[in-house]
Image: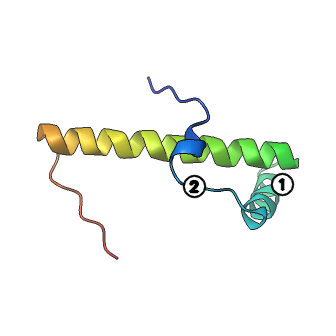
Amino acid sequence: MLYFDNMTQDVGYKITKQDIDSTIIYLKTQNKPNSREDAINYLQEKAAVAHVAAHKIVEDEQSGKIDLVKLKR
């Protein structure tokens, strides 16, 4: 089970007005609550999940469970 608590402050991701506006549009298309606060919460949750997943990948690489992940730039 993964647990996270508003980790976006520490991962270098800064939510922009454009991010919020785009997320509000997306939430509307999904028939989900779509206030500014809802959009911010959604973005924070997704950033935190990505942060936790990245840590898990690094742990798995270091333990030899998976090969080194190489990202294209």
Q: Which residue is mark 2?
A: 13
Which amino acid type is marked by label 1? Lys
Q: Which residue is mark 1?
A: 28
Of marks 1 and 2, the one in the foreground: 2
Identify which residue is drawn at 57% across, 55% down.
Answer: 13
Q: Quadrant of the C terminus?
A: bottom left
Identify which residue is drawn at 31% across, 73% down.
Answer: 72
Whether residue 4 appears in this view of the structure is: yes
Examine the image and state in which quarter residue 26 appears.
Answer: bottom right
Left or right of 23? Residue 62 is: left
Whether residue 34 appears in this view of the structure is: no
Vertical position of residue 14 compared to residue 31: above or below: below
In the picture, the disc for residue 40 is none
User: x and y percent of residue 48 in the render?
Assistant: 54, 41
Which amino acid type is marked by label 2? Tyr
The mark nearer the N terminus, 1 or 2, is: 2
Q: Helix, strand or loop at disc 2?
A: loop
Identify which residue is drawn at 78% across, 52% down.
Answer: 27
Spatial CA span between label 1 and label 2: 23 Å
User: x and y percent of residue 59 in the render?
Assistant: 24, 38
Closest to the observer, 53 or 7 = 7
